[in-house]
Amino acid sequence: MSAPLSIRPGVRAFTLIEALLAVAICAIVLVAINAVFATAVHLRDQTSAAVEAALPVDQALAMLRRDLRGAVGPGGMLAGDFKCDAQSMGLNMGVTAPSASGLDFFTATGTISDNAPWGDLQEVYYLLMDPQDGNAAAGKDLVRYVNRNLLSTVLLQPPDPQRLMSHIQSAEFDAFDGLQWRMWDTSMGDTNLPMAVRVRLHLAADNGGAANLEPLEVMVPLTTVTRTNLVSRPGGSGG
C-alpha cells in the first residue's frame, strides 16, 4: 500500500478560481492582440489597394507630361500639325474619333532601337474611349495612340490603343495662347505651338456613389517655338 502524498509546509497550490482568472486574462489579451492584428491587416489591404489604384493614374499623367514636354512644332517632312480639341484628329493613324475632344501632336519622345527603323519623332493622340467591357456606367478610358511610320503615304491599319487609365467621366483639353484657354489647330491658322496645354480629367462615380468633385489636372508649358514664315535677309539667304 502506497504512502499518502505529503504536502510540505509553506507550499501553496493554485486554486480553481485563480486558474480560471488566469485563463480569462490570457483570453482578453489574445482578443486584444487579434483585434490589433486584424486592424493592421485591414489597413495594409487598404493601403495596397490605394497604391494599386493610383499607380495607373501616376503613370498616365507622367506619360502625358513627357509627351507634351517633347512636343515638336509643325514644319518639315515629319512634324505635322498640333491639334487640341480640333476636328480631323487621328486621321494620319486611321483612327475615327467619337468626338473632337482630344489631343493630337508630334513629339520627340520615341524610343530609338536598333531593331526598328523609327527615329525619336512620333505622333501621339490622346482621347477618351468606351471601356473594353462596354460598361458605360464605369466611365471611359484614357487612350493613347502612337504613329511612328511618319513617311508612309498609304493609310495603314490603325495602331493598337494603349489604355492608360479608366473610370473617367469626361476630359477637357485646352491650349493657352497667352490670354485665354481655347482649342488649337495649326492647320486652321495657328502657326506655332501654344504656350501651355491643360488637361482635366473628371473621374466617374465609384459604385454608384457621388463623383469626385476635384478633377485631375495636368498643365504643361511648351517651350518649343517654331517659325513657319521665314523671310530672306537682304543680301543673303533666308534663315
Image (tube, helix red, strand yellow):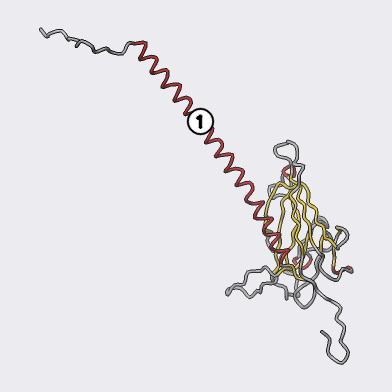
Q: Is residue 78 above or below residue 98?
A: below
Residue in the foreground of this view, choosing between 144 and 10: 10
Quick one: 50 or 166, which is closer to the camera? 50
**Residue lying farthest to the bottom in this orientation:** 235
Depth order, front residue of 67/167: 67
Left or right: residue 10 versus residue 231 is left
Which residue does the image show at 81% across and 61% down from the upper left? 84
The vertical placement of 188 against 49, above or below, is below
Residue type marked 1: Val
Residue 163, position in %: x, y? 68, 55
Residue depicted at x 73% and y 63%: 68
Q: Pick the quarter of the image with the N terminus.
A: top left
| Disc 1, SS | helix
Q: Quadrant of the C terminus?
A: bottom right
Q: Position of residue 49 (x, y in %)?
A: 60, 43
**Residue 65 found in image quarter:** bottom right
Q: Please, is residue 29 above or below residue 40 in the view?
A: above
Check disc 1: other Cα within 10 Å, few if <14, some if 14-19, many if 20+.
few
Residue position for label 1: 36
Residue in the foreground of this view, choosing between 188 and 41: 41
